[in-house]
Amino acid sequence: MHQQLLFVLVLLFIVLLLIMLAQRIKIAYPIFLVLAGLAISFIPEIPKIRINHELIFLIFLPPLIYEAAWYTSWNDFWRRKGTIAFLAFDLVFFTSMVVAFAAFNIIPGFSLPLGFLLGGIISPTDAVAAENILTGMKVPKTILIILKGETLVNDASSLIVCRFALAAVVTGGFSMPAAVGEFILVTGMGVFIGLVGAHLMYAVHRFLPTTPNINTALTLMTPYVLYLGAEQFHFSGIMAVVSGGLYLSFRSLELFSKGETRLNMVGTWNTITFMLNALVFIIIGLDLPEIINGLGNHSPSEAIKYGILISSITIIVRFIWVYPVLYVRKWFSKATREGSSLGWKGPLIMGMAGMRGGVSLATALSIPVLMGNNVPFPFRNLILFITFIVIFITLVIQGLALPLVIKLIRITETDDIILEDRQHDDIRARLIQVALKKLDDKYSLEVRDNERLGALKNNLEKEIVNTNLQVRSWEFAKKEHEKTELFNTVLRDIYSDQRKELFILRKEKKFNDELIRQLLVQIDLDELKIGDPNKPV
């Protein structure tokens, strides 16, 4: 037990070092961790990693999906629901079908149900990989919204395909009407249970005497409650987490009225999801030797050939689906017109961003070793190996090529960023007006007699004038955006020097430590207001 714990701690430390190295050489850490895990796995005397798929499904998957749902804008998601559903459901089914017939014809002895199982496994894309690779790249927000929405939902659709295909392999029978009916039931009831669970958690947060720490602990429990609640009745746990996460995120302003609660939650969740994602990607690389050892009758070279062929088919299918069909659908869907308004460059990025990750590997590992009467599951190890090759090619090769392609095609940002800045000023103006109205209606006498309140009102009146001028100046939007970025850069530089000065003051031991910490938090909050230029939207 002590040795296992020590190995986990050492692995976590190595992961952190590798991520710092990836940042230094400017490679997205999911790519670097897979390559590093692959290299580490071949070092002699390194303990072999045996992944329990239930560990990823139960420990890793619920919080990662919940966090993605929480930070997904419901308005953006709903506005582009047609395009997202088109990729998250239709493309998953199309990919599964094409891969099924391809594997059936390419791999001797491979049946169609096994092909659909393989197709379902490698269909879902990985949100974390795409987000990290696109960090800092000038990619239009519309593309990021569609990609994030797709990855939020396609895990559920792919797992449902796998469930039906697995049943067909084990029982030897398959009914399309029954499968469609069960798909609707599993998906719909998953959403229903997620919303019921979310309403219960909403009531706990809203009406019980919670504290910031209790609220944070409850949010960590919520994805597991939603997931296990749906899976207990054999419905889609992922859809429960997605629907519950979207609902609670939409109502979050009502739930958490105190800034301390939100800051506490953000820090905790960012750390936890960061570590979970990092562990998933390095485990993918570490597990390869174990997968190779289980190939059995298939030679590694033969398995690699199958893996490359299936990977190529998967990549081509995505481009075939994203390009022509989006342009056909744009005449029928406003949301799709928005997604295709970037010409050929937008679909190119969406096609290349179809990287696979930990969910595919966990799903492949969930295939039982034995069927009924202790009969070995056919081609299990080959399916595992092909899944790894697809993950490796789409994640590493496409992931490294994607930033180069974005720079090469010089895709221009649409008005998304400028529109956000304009909206920011509109919102800020309304908030200042609320503050001024409160001072005039309720505290007019106090403002007259209290110098600090008088100064606050004067500052707010000046700020509302400046903000209104900024709102009216958006006819020069691009130039104003550049000025804003320069202003924010200067502020970040000032905040950096202020932190250094606080550190010097602490060393002088003349000032109260608690007061210094409070001022440091205030600087951090001021910096949060202007955002991080390197953080993905």
Image (cartoon, helix red, strand yellow):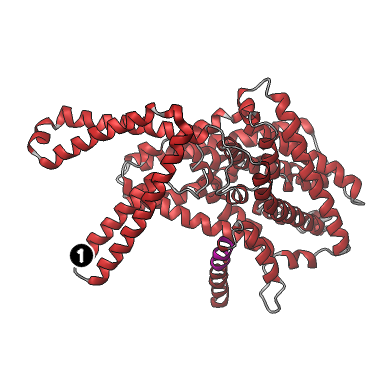
Q: Quadrant of residue 366?
A: bottom right
Please name the predominant secondary structure of the magenta segment in the image. Answer: helix
In the rendered image of this protein, does residue 290 appear above or below residue 431? Answer: below
Total numbered circles: 1
Residue at the location (38% across, 50% down)?
Answer: 490
Q: Quadrant of the N terminus?
A: bottom right
- Dot 1, how many residues are within 10 Å of its Cα: few (below 14), some (14-19), or many (20+)? few
Asked whether residue 168 appears in the rendered view, the answer is no
Residue 330 appears at what percent x and percent y?
68, 24
Q: Amino acid at mark 1?
A: Asn
Judging depth in this view, the residue of 245 and 502 nearest the camera is: 502
User: Does the magenta run of residues contain 19?
Assistant: yes
Q: Quadrant of residue 209?
A: top left
Element type at marker 1? loop
User: Does the magenta run of residues contain 159?
Assistant: no
Residue 492 appears at what percent x and percent y?
38, 52
Residue at far top of view:
332
Residue 243 appears at what percent x and percent y?
53, 37
Judging depth in this view, the residue of 187 and 344 nearest the camera is: 344
Residue 182 appears at what percent x and percent y?
69, 34
Residue at the location (74% across, 57% down)?
Answer: 388
Judging depth in this view, the residue of 94 and 515 nearest the camera is: 515
Residue at far bottom of view:
45
> What segment carries the magenta color?
16-23
In the rendered image of this protein, does residue 459 appear above or below residue 215? Answer: above
Left or right of 53, for residue 256: left
Residue at the location (53% across, 45% down)?
Answer: 68
Judging depth in this view, the residue of 114 and 421 nearest the camera is: 421
Q: Which residue is mark 1?
A: 512
In the rendered image of this protein, does residue 456 appear above or below residue 59? Answer: above
